Image (tube, helix red, strand yellow):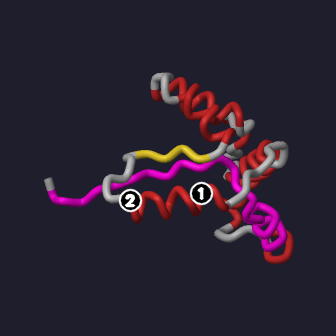
Amino acid sequence: MQGVTVSYVEPGALDTGFFARSAGVRAERGYAGDPTTTAIYSEAVHRVGSALSTTKPAALAPVVRAVERALTTRSPAPRYVVGREAKMISGIVRRLPTGARDRAILRALHLDAAAFTTPSS
């Protein structure tokens, strides 16, 4: 229609050091935002960090190759799922209805309503 081709590269957990660095910055500087926002999200951030700490991150090279392929191939695929974990999860969750998929992802990250504390006024 507009002559623009879009490809989506979907990696699993990657070995970037992002979570370790962000935890270090958070420990050094505290949370960004006002105290109310911190109160609401700090438990959720802690739970997600715990859940993700059990995953074995994949190397970046396969993701870089997938991005390169998407950018340089004459007819790129619309979607590149990269890594064993991403392929396994993608195969399962893409067959679920949206609501069930969202609940499964939240459960895997240990998130429920109690993870988001509303401060009392």
The image quarter containing residue 73 is bottom left
Give yes or no for contact between labels 2 and 1 (Cβ–Cβ under 8 Å). no
Query: Residues in magenta?
Result: 2-25
Query: Disc 1 designates what residue?
Result: 63
Left or right placement of residue 1 versus residue 47 in this view: left
Query: Residue 115's quadrant in the figure?
Result: top right
Identity, as a three-letter code, of the amino acid under mark 2:
Thr
Q: In this view of the protein, which residue sits in the foreground, 70 or 17?
A: 70
For the point 37% across and 53% down, the residue is 76
Q: Distance between the residues labelled 2 and 1?
A: 15 Å
Residue 91 image offset from top left, x and y in percent: 56, 29
Q: Around disc 1, counting alpha carbons within 10 Å, would you say few (fewer than 14), some (14 to 19), or many (20 or more)?
A: many
Q: Is residue 61 magenta?
A: no
Magenta-colored stretch includes residue 19: yes
Give the number of the mark in front: 2 or 1. 2
105 in relation to 69, above or below: above
As drawn, the residue found furthest toward the left would be: 1
| Residue at (71% x, 34% y) in the render | 108
Checking the image for residue 73, the label placed there is: 2
Residue 106: x percent and y percent?
Answer: 64, 35
Residue at figure coordinates x 40%, y 64% from the top left = 72
Left of 120 or right of it: where is 55? right
Residue 99 or residue 53, whichever sits in front? 53
Crowdedness near tag 2: few (<14), some (14–19) or many (≥20) residues, C-alpha within 10 Å:
few
Using the image, determine if residue 65 lies above or below residue 78.
Answer: below
Label annotation for residue 82: none
What SS does tag 2 mark? loop
- The tag earlier along the polypeptide, 2 or 1, is 1
**As shown in the figure, which amino acid type bears the numbered disc 1?**
Val
Residue 104 x %, y %: 62, 28
Closer to the camera, 49 or 92? 92
Element at badge 1? helix
